[in-house]
């Protein structure tokens, strides 16, 4: 299964995103990004399946959680 990472600015944002996603039935995992994975250096993100990506980004939008990028 192909995975995507939605990058966020902080660990707190990643945890909030994880809670929002899982409460809406989307499987997600909080991950720490290496400096090479992120445009801004180290950071955090949530990993979701590629098939859930559109639903996940929509869920974050409606939950008021801003994300930086999708990798």
Image: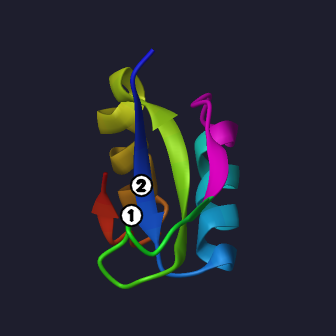
Of 59 and 13, the residue lying toward us: 13
Residue 30 painted magenta: yes
Among the 4 quarters of the image, the one containing residue 52 = top left
Check if mark 2's residue and mark 1's residue have beta carbons within 8 Å. Answer: no
Pick whichever of labels 2 and 1 is earlier in the sequence. 2
* Secondary element at tag 1: loop
State the residue at coordinates (69%, 40%): 23
- Quadrant showing the N terminus: top left
State the residue at coordinates (51%, 68%): 34
* Secondary element at tag 2: strand
Q: What is the C-alpha distance between the residues marked 2 and 1?
A: 11 Å
Extreme residue in the bottom direction = 40
Q: Residues within 10 Å of mark 2 (few under 14, many from 20)?
A: many
Of 15 and 20, the residue lying toward us: 15
In the rendered image of this protein, does residue 70 appear above or below residue 2?
below
Q: Which residue is mark 1?
A: 37
Q: Which mark is residue 57?
A: none
State the residue at coordinates (58%, 44%): 21
Q: Which residues are magenta?
A: 22-31
Q: Which residue is mark 2?
A: 6
Q: Residues within 10 Å of mark 1 (few under 14, many from 20)?
A: some
Of 7 and 61, the residue lying toward us: 7
In the rendered image of this protein, does residue 48 appear above or below residue 45?
above
In the rendered image of this protein, does residue 66 appear above or below residue 37?
below
Residue 67 lies, in percent from the top left, at: 38, 69
Residue 17 lies, in percent from the top left, at: 58, 59
Q: Foreground mark, 2 or 1? A: 1
Residue 3 lies, in percent from the top left, at: 43, 31
How many marks do you count on the picture? 2
Extreme residue in the front direction = 36
Residue 38 lies, in percent from the top left, at: 37, 71
Q: Left or right: 10 with respect to 38?
A: right
């Amino acid at each position: 299964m192909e995975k995507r990472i939605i990058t966020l600015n902080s660990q707190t944002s990643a945890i909030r995103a994880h809670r929002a996603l899982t409460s809406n039935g989307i499987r997600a995992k909080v991950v720490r990004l290496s400096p090479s994975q992120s445009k801004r250096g180290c950071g955090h993100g949530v990993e979701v399946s590629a098939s859930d990506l559109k639903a996940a980004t929509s869920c974050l939008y409606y939950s008021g959680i801003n994300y930086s990028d999708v990798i």
